[in-house]
Amino acid sequence: MTNPRLNRRDVFPPTGPEISAKSWLTEAPMRMLMNNLHPDVAENPHELVVYGGIGRAARTWDDFDRIVGALKALEADETLVVQSGRPVAVVKTHADAPRVLIANSNIVPHWANWEHFNDLDRKGLMMYGQMTAGSWIYIGSQGIVQGTYETFAEAGRQHYGGDLRGKWILTAGLGGMGGAQPLAAVMAGACCLAVECDETRADFRIRTRYVDEKTRSLDEALAMIERWTKAGEAKSVALIGNAADVFPEIVRRMKAGLPMPNGRPDIVTDQTSAHDPVHGYLPQDWSVAEWRERQESDPKAVERAARASMRVHVAAMVDFWNAGVPTLDYGNNIRQVAKEEGLENAFAFPGFVPAYIRPLFCRGVGPFRWCALSGDPEDIYRTDEAMKRLFPENEHLHRWLDMARDRIAFQGLPARICWIGLGERHRAGLMFNEMVAKGELKAPIVIGRDHLDSGSVASPNRETEAMKDGSDAVSDWPLLNALVNTASGATWVSLHHGGGVGMGFSQHAGMVIVADGTEAAARRLERVLWNDPASGVWRHADAGYEMALDCAREHGLRLPAILGN
Amino acid sequence: MTNPRLNRRDVFPPTGPEISAKSWLTEAPMRMLMNNLHPDVAENPHELVVYGGIGRAARTWDDFDRIVGALKALEADETLVVQSGRPVAVVKTHADAPRVLIANSNIVPHWANWEHFNDLDRKGLMMYGQMTAGSWIYIGSQGIVQGTYETFAEAGRQHYGGDLRGKWILTAGLGGMGGAQPLAAVMAGACCLAVECDETRADFRIRTRYVDEKTRSLDEALAMIERWTKAGEAKSVALIGNAADVFPEIVRRMKAGLPMPNGRPDIVTDQTSAHDPVHGYLPQDWSVAEWRERQESDPKAVERAARASMRVHVAAMVDFWNAGVPTLDYGNNIRQVAKEEGLENAFAFPGFVPAYIRPLFCRGVGPFRWCALSGDPEDIYRTDEAMKRLFPENEHLHRWLDMARDRIAFQGLPARICWIGLGERHRAGLMFNEMVAKGELKAPIVIGRDHLDSGSVASPNRETEAMKDGSDAVSDWPLLNALVNTASGATWVSLHHGGGVGMGFSQHAGMVIVADGTEAAARRLERVLWNDPASGVWRHADAGYEMALDCAREHGLRLPAILGN
Ligand SMILES: NC(=O)c1ccc[n+]([C@@H]2O[C@H](COP(=O)([O-])OP(=O)(O)OC[C@H]3O[C@@H](n4cnc5c(N)ncnc54)[C@H](O)[C@@H]3O)[C@@H](O)[C@H]2O)c1
Ligand SMILES: NC(=O)c1ccc[n+]([C@@H]2O[C@H](COP(=O)([O-])OP(=O)(O)OC[C@H]3O[C@@H](n4cnc5c(N)ncnc54)[C@H](O)[C@@H]3O)[C@@H](O)[C@H]2O)c1
């Protein structure tokens, strides 16, 4: 029997101004689906895997083909319905309704665990959608470079007076997301030692200039860091090894006072795919080949061993924290696993969201991104310039846009990301739409965001960790976000479960909207790009954050039970 | 401190053709919310409880007032957003978008249990929405009378050649839903012995003629049943007692060959609120007063004791099953609790859905209901007649409509329910809309359904128990149902978690649409009342049910991955 998920063919999205679907509103999801599987974008495109362990864009290759076929045939008053990567139905709707509605990996709570999911997955009844994989708005590493850069920069501000020169960051995982860490660290001015067990992943990051050096020796890696930090140079090294071995060894040396740059790492974090204990985390003392083989033949054994190693790994992170090193969980659920494995103080160190991101969410600020359907980098450079003109006083934004142009290679369709908030996003969208209308860009622009955003996610170990009112686990909010975006006229809307923290631990919603230069699109953009970040402002205002309440008042939001208006 | 959920005021929906909101599309949800709390409709309106233990219509009385205020002010291009019974925001949408979007009781799976919910509930961050309580389309007992009648009649067909004369049904629970059982049994031709611990509940059912007699003595109850079954009379008796005592006692007598009508019950089921172990099930040897008091003061103790009693209760049901008595779980999750309490064979007897309801769901047949906003019973009688004319050959429907008119007293706004399917619902909706347009009815009609329907629920212990492909727990389907109804233009749409089987065990979606006699409404009705049952047909077609596949082909549904079209 052939594997319906394996195919040697390479997928590239069409580019340019000619379309094969019936409108840009259906051409756009088709190109973006294909872009998610572009060889420069996806981690493992031949198996439909976009990023994050097993985050897929379609359930099988047949489903991929049928989605493409359905999108090409879709009329302006029809909607394609996708259930866990499978195009189940085409229904009659209307022009202002979304063209695609997606639900991925959702399981009734009592059964929402990896074991049940894997069983459904094996039976061909599901796929894992991650966040932007199954919702067709992944754009490669740039998204995560930006987010990680903001996080490291904020950590630098809070702990090192805003200056990361001569500092070094210890982390692990150079996968789809984690691979952004060395570059983000370097952009933020710091050195970076990243432990990665799979040499091919490290090589990929060397090739794309996200990481500078590679070694198999901890001594050698530390010597490089020593040299760079001394010289005030921001550079990075990938250490081929297992984080569950390396982290405790560095703790040992630190405690023993053995030589080490600055005597200890200056920031510690981790981006192995710990959220998926079967596919995402190499157990100690296993080879990568053995690991991959036994993921198929004996997944339970892999899981057991991986979970035990994660406990060791987190225990070392707690040691760093207790020694005063700023340590943060980067949203992969590793503390939860360690806790379940009996590590009582696994949650001693914080997640990155309450530590650094929540103040942004209170103002609806989050990972706004856009992509040039023309495929022409010039279109993005034009929007870069236009964004600088639209927000002339936002220096932080200007610096990011300049650095990004310089250091970040486009992957697949050219795209840009920056964090902006309520009152800004709809203005950017309307401006892009006008640029399309005026012919300043060669084709329409697609505008979307990560599910990790202000109003679109409930994830108590990550985005909604430690909410002020204790509402961390309330998932009415992301469901309402999806319903509101559907009612407002986004081009496609998705509801996912699992994402970066794994089965059972989050529910979240995606939104993408096309600026095709029409009047109708302008009306939809204005509604969607206002309501979507606004939903984050109400969510945080309802939780009692003053900053969100101020933002709501300032923007005249009507919040009956919250502001009494 | 005053309890924000307690208020002595009585709520009655306005009736007649004058409206105080800006359109019928906003007047309708306002009247229906109020109707849910009408003293003749709600189980405990002063505490905002509509039915099913703690299923509420609004989170607090303040929230109720603010919802009403917001609906009155809502414009034709605005949407009210309700989070667990609290009106959090008013957003700009468009005329074809829903006027209200609701998410109730949704919790991220890992935290989706009673303990966490109760904690959120106590903190004022949530309410329990049940199914139609928080989505404002509960119409009193009629809905459940119809469903229960269909179920008992089908059981009669399968086990007793279609004739329930001289047979008797043993059950428990005469609450909001369960109270329908004696009447449904009698309508289906059987006698009924219903155990109820709370005498006030039994008295309410006596007053409304849903049950015929009441006693505190099992011997007396059995003597009545003996008399009636012998005489071929269909009548019912409420036995005041605890089901966990009475069921085993009847088993004991049956096994011992002691005198009993027919030597054993002919059908056994149960509708205590077992889904909610703190508020829904009286533990053995507790008084009702003590139970209520300790629900507040020591909920953990209540839960422990209730769960232990449920085990005893289910063990007796398994004994009936093993003795050859048709025994069914009526969707209150009692088998799950018994299993968790260590009763290995708790799932020996089936749920009512796979046993009797699934074949209907495969054709999109489910609990279609409508309500006369005029408040005038004549409007319903007119629609009854019109339905008979629209479906002239459906004898089953005709019989139900006649019996319902005869035996069922309206509660609150007059309403009717009947089970119809894909291809029928939109015709009924369009017909009602035309009747409104022509002035044949005094005001618009509201059309909705239970969340227990063909495409709107994932509930592995009830609606999706034992699906052919093993997809019982896949909840992409109800989420897609809500998104599709939102995109199609339903007047209000809701997404709930918990419902009748309790926290962690189901996710489901509600839909209501207003037939106000306009052309625009006709277009929306045609889309919504087609897509909504169609979503049930695809869900079952995807699971491999031939009947659903046939139905899909027959109606020309476009299902890319399922039919390849
Ligand atoms: N926004 C967020 O909250 C956020 C951002 C980035 C990443 N994450 C999370 O971080 C994790 C990583 O994401 P990704 O997309 O990079 O995943 P990925 O699966 O593509 O990469 C994980 C990498 O870790 C490596 N690895 C696994 N076990 C290891 C071990 N024991 N030692 C060293 N290396 C090991 C793997 O070889 C792989 O290259 C995920 O859990 C993701 O959800 C969250
Ligand atoms: N469609 C369905 O699947 C469906 C239909 C009807 C009911 N149900 C389920 O059935 C249950 C009942 O619903 P309801 O709305 O009537 O609830 P309810 O809370 O209004 O009524 C439950 C009744 O059971 C009585 N009771 C509790 N413990 C008892 C005991 N030990 N012995 C005897 N009586 C006892 C209570 O006094 C109460 O009157 C719920 O769990 C509901 O979800 C499901």
Image (cartoon, coloured by chain):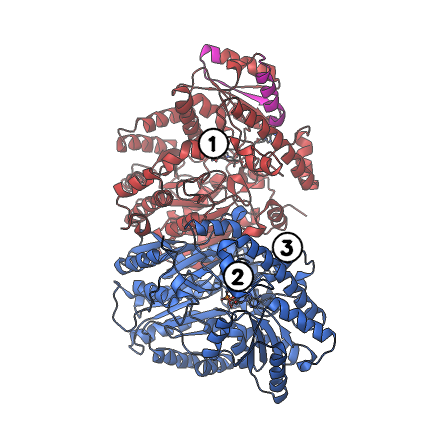
Chain colours: A blue, B red
Determine the secondary structure under disc 3: helix
What's drawn in magenta, residue-wise? B229-258
Res A163 visible: no
User: Is ligand 1 less than 8 Å from the beta carbon at label 2?
Assistant: no
Identity, as a three-letter code, of the amino acid under mark 2: Trp
Mark 2, residue position: A291
Identity, as a three-letter code, of the amino acid under mark 3: Glu
Mark 1, residue position: B141
Asked whether B254 falls inside the magenta stretch, the response is: yes
Foreground mark, 2 or 3, reads 2
What residue lies at 33% left-to-right and 31% top-to-bottom? B384
Q: Are marks 3 and 1 in contact (CB under 8 Å)?
A: no
Label 2 and label 1: CA atoms lie apart by 58 Å
Circle 1 Cα neighbour tier, 10 Å, few/some/many (<14 / 14–19 / ≥20) = many
Foreground mark, 3 or 1, reads 3
Label 3 and label 1: CA atoms lie apart by 45 Å
Question: How far across and down, in percent of the image, does residue A519 sit?
Answer: 31, 67
Q: Is residue B148 above or below residue B527?
A: above
Question: How far across and down, in percent of the image, does residue B354 sit?
Answer: 43, 34
Mark 3, residue position: A340
What residue lies at 53% left-to-right and 24% top-to-bottom? B322
What residue lies at 31% left-to-right and 56% top-to-bottom? A66
Question: How far across and down, in percent of the image, does residue A363 sit?
Answer: 53, 68
Res B214 visible: yes
Circle 2 Cα neighbour tier, 10 Å, few/some/many (<14 / 14–19 / ≥20) = many
Asked whether A263 falls inside the magenta stretch, the response is: no
Instruction: Out of A435 and B477, give the one closest to the viewer.
Output: B477
User: Is ligand 1 less than 8 Å from the beta carbon at label 3?
Assistant: no
